[in-house]
Amino acid sequence: MRLRRLELIRYGGFSDRVLDFGAGKPDLHLVIGPNEAGKSTMLQAIGDLLFGIPTQSAQNWRYDYGDLRIRALLGGGTGDLDVTRRKGKRNTLLAPDGSALADDALAPWLGGMDRRSFERMFGLDHTKLREGGEAILVGKDDAARIVLEAGTGFAGIGQELKKLEEQAGMLFKPSAQIPVINRLMRERTDALATVRSTMLSDSDWATVKARRDAAEATRASLVAEGRDLALRAHAIERINRIRPLLARRSVAQEVLNGLGPVRPMPTDAGERLSLALAERGTAQELQELETGKRERARTERKAIELPDQLLAAKAGVETLASRLAVAEKAGLDLVQRKAEQATLLDRSARVRIEAGLAADHAIPGSGLRKRLRDMLEDGRRLDAENSRLHQNRQAIDDELGRLPPLQEEGTAEASLGALRAVLDRVPTDAAGRMKSLSTAREKLSARLDDVIAGLAPWHGTVEALRKCVPPAAGETLLAANGIDEARASLAAAEAEIVEAEKQVVGIRTELAALSEAGVLPTPEVVASARARRDAVIQTVRVRLDAARADDDALVGAELRNVTDRADRLADRRDADAHRVAQHGVLSRRKAELEERIGLARGVIERESVRLEAATQAWADLLRRLAFKRSIPPADVDRWRTERDRALAVADELREAARTSADFEAELGARSDALNAVLAGVGQFASSVALPDLLERARHEIARLDEMVRARDIATGERGRLDKALESLRGSIVEADRSRSVFEADRKQILSEVGLSDHLPAVAVADALDAFDELAADVGTLTTMERQILLDEKQVSDFTVSLGTLLEALGKPSSGRPFEQARVLSDDLGSALRAQATLRRHVEIEQEAEEGLVAIEHRLGATSRVISDLMGVAGASSEEELAELIEFGRKARGYDAELARLAAEILGECEGLDPAVVTEQAATLSPDEAAAELDAIRIRRVEIEEAREAVGRELASAEADMSGAATATGAADAQQDAVAIGAAMAEAAERHVEVATAAALLRWMIDRHRATAQAPLIERAGALFAQVTAGAFTGLVLDYDEDDRPLIKGLRANSSRVGVDGMSEGTRDQLYLALRLGAVAGRGVSQALPVICDDLLITADDGRATEMLRVLAAASRDNQIILFSHHEHLIDVARSAIGNQGFVLHRIDRTPIGAAA
Amino acid sequence: MSSDFTFIHAADIHLDSPLSGLAARDPAFSALVRGATRKAFANLVDLAITEGAAFVVISGDLYDGTWKDQSTGQFAVAQFARLSRAGIRAFVVYGNHDAESRITRHLTMPEGVYAFDNRKCEFKALDDLGVVVHGRSYKEAATLENIASEYTPPIRGRFNIALLHTALEGHPRHAAYAPCKLDELRASGHDYWALGHVHEAAVRAEFSHIVYPGNTQGRHVRETGAKGAMVVRVENGLVKGLEHRPVDEVRWAVAQVDATDATDMRGLLEGVAASLRLSITDAGDRPTASRLIVKAGGPLRERLLADPDWFTSEVIGQASAVSDLLWIEKVKLGPAGEAGPSGLPPELASLLADAINDPDCIRAIEAAIAPLVSKLPGDVGDPELTPLLAAARLGDGTALLTAARTAVEARLDIGTD
């Protein structure tokens, strides 16, 4: 498939732009235009045409989404297709007549490609070229991978394979410790070991239970023994307790036996005698007291006298006293009520006059007064209603007066419509979009500044940067090599000096050590010593022939000395022979090293000069390129990349500025239109700035809106008020009718009451209040007269009763009845109290008489008790009786003591037979008992200790048993093991996933190598030869030491160059050759246009020439469309492939057409 | 006639059975899930005491199969002792797991706890309540005969409860032990069949009642929702109230997100958060382990497939924002919808298509995972959760290759953009 024609009907900032690619002879199209001409938009349009306009496309800034249209004429083996693409979800492909084509109408033309595949495979730009070249370098030892990546356009296959293999390795390795699964296996093993070690097994549990049972049994045994010992100790202690009781019983029995026979006496004889004597004394004292009391009562009774006449009239006096308070109150009330009666009568007469009621006219009854009151209320209500109606009438008149005059319809609506129509055509959020464009421009500008700054120490403008061509790779390499070699030589020489000096120091140390061993005896010294020895020997020989002399001994001694010295020197020299030799060797070595140091210093001097010259030459070169200071040659590549980036940003900035200007122009046109409409409605704007105009237009629309709305409101309000006025008039007529009926009623009621019908309502209301007052006074007077009659009767009745009583007592009336009655009542009270005192004295006398009789009886009884006891005891006197009673008490005491002891002994026997216990006490001596108790005590202490120990054992066993209920160690460890297992399973699943994916990817690479590598290498080799201008004659596969296939370039002299020996540019060319070779190898159905965007941006003219030749060659199979903003490429192309070898298209701001 | 009373019906307590499927990623959650089955059993005892239950019936699987730790049994005894001290009697039939367990052989149950014989059905009468409890324990795990048919007949005038550990007429996730028919139980005349074995609570019939209470603690993500026991209120010899009450400590949930309409990760993650929030609605203050199943398509699906670890970490982040008590058990990508264009060039697509039929490719893939398969412990991995691992063990090269192909497609499609 190829594009015969491309038309941007409405797309991005363009309309009706056409690129005519013709019939395809030739089919290499060079599209040249500055960046702002819309090159990027064209590129985008090709993709959108073939695969649809994306949902979030940014190409709607001038035309709405619904208006976007791209049209193309597609050519291919089966004919042509004229198709237009619009934006939407379906039916986005249109035929020339506007009818919808099937959504998949382009599928047969695209060879199964989707957009991403198309862009990867058939889209080529400088960045992809560079990334592809780098990928080739990274994968230099993997020819199959390089071929697959270049052939498919996927530069990341190798990276994905590496990532997958790394991920698989991080998860698991067969013999490693760190990967996740390996670590989890160890942790799981540990957790399972913890399960086993902390689990309470059957046997563990049985052991714990056995421990508990054994301890239980031991404790039971100890408890039983302790119990037996306690019983025995108790028995001995019982014997010990009984032993003194038995002794005391024996003594008491002996004393009782000594008392002899005793006459039986009642056991209470002593007590009875004592009681009788005490009773007798008490009775005698009471007798004296009662006699005195009787005599005192009798004397006081005789001194009292009673008023018998008053006591006889007791009932009458008491009756009168009871009525006294009521009668006295009635007298006082009578006086007060009579005064009030007179006052009321005066006031009633005065009120009647005030009410205007004739003296003979009856006071109106309550019914009449109510009718009068209702009449007054009706009058007030009618007055209020009348007032309200008139107020409402006034209010409606006021509102009608305030309403605006009626207006004509139509004018405001027309103005409003015109303004809105113009405003709708102004882009929404123009200011925001303008600001956004401006912000984007500023960001790009700032980014450009940053990138330019990043080029330091180079400095200059963008234009200077465009002209600044950095040193070529060869030049850079040469300079770098020169500097590096000088530096390397310097470093080597310095290293040699350091090493040599280090060795010299070592040698000096060794020489010093050798010297310190002592001065060596030189051969001369040894020879001198031997000569001396021989001289002395000669002297001795001479002396042997001569007579003995006195100093012969001295000569002999000297001979011995010099002989010894010569021998020692000789021995020492022999012994140190090795040391001597070593000293010599080291001395020679030291001299050699010092010579080498001298030579190396000479090298340093020479290489320093060479380095300075190379550095200076490099710095001069950079200075000419506007570098403030030098940078290392190795950094030039990086700087070049930064330069490319800076230029790309500069291009983007220019594109953004152009877009901004376009948009501003469009806004200007809209402003003019808006200004014209505003002028048409009489709103001349003082400013033509769009924001001001928009504000003014919106304000005008709001004003007109408000005007229309106010008119509508006033019309509605006027209708409402007219209706209200009509209703009010009806209410006023109704109110007038009610008033006339009221007036007739009013006259009738006033006549009945006796008032004039001319009286105003206020006077009538006052008269009504007076009538109410008079009616109330009449009731009060009637009640008061009845009470006065009752009070008078009370006073009269009391006075008559008092007179009758005074007459009976024979007393005269004093004229003050209430006071006289109160005195009579007091006198009667005194008489009654004296009568009561007299009766109490009589009773005391009688009681005393009765008491004396009783005392006589008690004295007789005591005498009888004493005489009876004497009779029983056979005593003749009270003293003898007392002695006999005491003798009997003692005998009874010992009997009781014996009985008590017997009981105590029985109690101590605790149910045992006392005879048996007595027998035991008799057979167990106190000493034996003490010894046995002591032994028991010791044994019991031992048992206690044993019980304590077994108790601890039992507690321990039971703690183990109860602890089992809360022990969770094994369960927790099992949970951990399961969780670790789950984590391990997850990791294993992931490992399987990535390891299998890696294996599959590796297989794909190998498979591709086997099936597609050779033809691709061959096709690409031919292209590579062209693109490198003959520097290489083709590509070959070679193998490294590990027998891995490598791609190598083949030189004309048959030498082979690996990818790491190629320059960066050559690697780019290799990638281009591989890509175009792969494209060319596709079938006809998949031969789509290759779109190249600024592909040659970094190529020099020579390299661009060759690349254009390659593209021309490739255009025989595929349409090639090459976009560029480099004008000089036209000349390069003409020179490389001639005018007939390509079609030139220019893009500028005017509609474009094809030009050969 | 029986008096009014309340009893608790529980089953499948599986004491000290570990919760499975939770990878030990988070120590805090690991600490929470420890001892969950024990805590659930203690909660059951609390429930009985709080409700004033007259007695508790446990219809089998108190213990967990081959687990041999006697501490587990002693814990059970301690809990039964709590019931006993509160005057609450307990009746237990042993199920298939108990029959397997060695723990039951060494236990001495406290007073008031009765474990039914495993040779024949027997019954215990509670004269004070007018209740008769019938039951029979399993003698061996694989009890495949119909033991319900041998149960003692109901005693007239009493409220008859029959304890039975059974799969009834069968259940897809439970062995068909002690099989019997629903109609057969209904016809028996017992008032309440207290069943166990199936882990989902269900009232299979009413009057007479045939009830599964479900287990007391979910043990993996297939046992979702509230787990607990039935509180049964009996008045005048009739069941008047039947309520399932939760006693579980940790809850399991499955959250599903349909992101087929989502266009970006943000939309997807918003859906994830909403779904996770929904999954813990009824959990209260219980920790919840939730599985997230995401249905996605197109580029979004490819992105999730290409870097599942990254997506899982994003989901975990969302979960922590939803609740401190929510943990992610696993993130699963649901089945793909309609397959879209792969975005791979025909060369790669063709290579992938060829791979399926290439024995060398399958051999290469099997060789890549052979070291792991040979070293990985055999009991690690659930075929449902780790299907690729299962396929690796079974030597299912086709399945492995299909998965590898999906992964490669996703990675190439995403990774190289």
Image (cartoon, grey):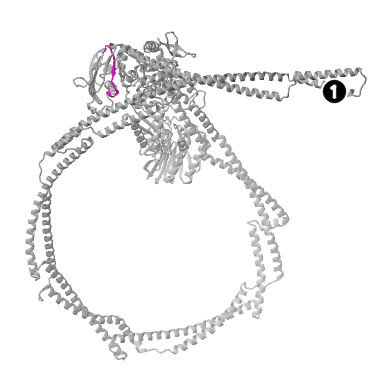
Q: Which residue is more in the foreground, A766 or A162?
A: A162
Residue at horizontal 75%, vertical 18%? Answer: A523
Q: Which residue is more in the foreground, A1112 or A215?
A: A1112
Q: Which residues are magenta?
A: A24-37
Tell me if residue B328 can be seen.
yes
Give residue A73's quadrant in the image.
top left
Q: SS for tag 1?
A: helix
Is A690 placed left or right of A924 in the picture?
left
Q: Give the image location of residue A1064, x and y in percent.
A: 41, 18
Give residue B298's quadrant in the image.
top left
Chain of residue at mark 1: A
Measured along the vertical axis of the image, is residue B84 above or below residue B342?
below
Is B34 placed left or right of A677 in the picture?
right
Residue at horizontal 10%, vertical 76%? Answer: A359
Residue behind mark 1: A558
Measured along the vertical axis of the image, is residue B145 above or below residue A309?
above
Does the stretch in magenta take in B307? no
User: Which residue in the rendered view is the most extreme toward the right?
Assistant: A547
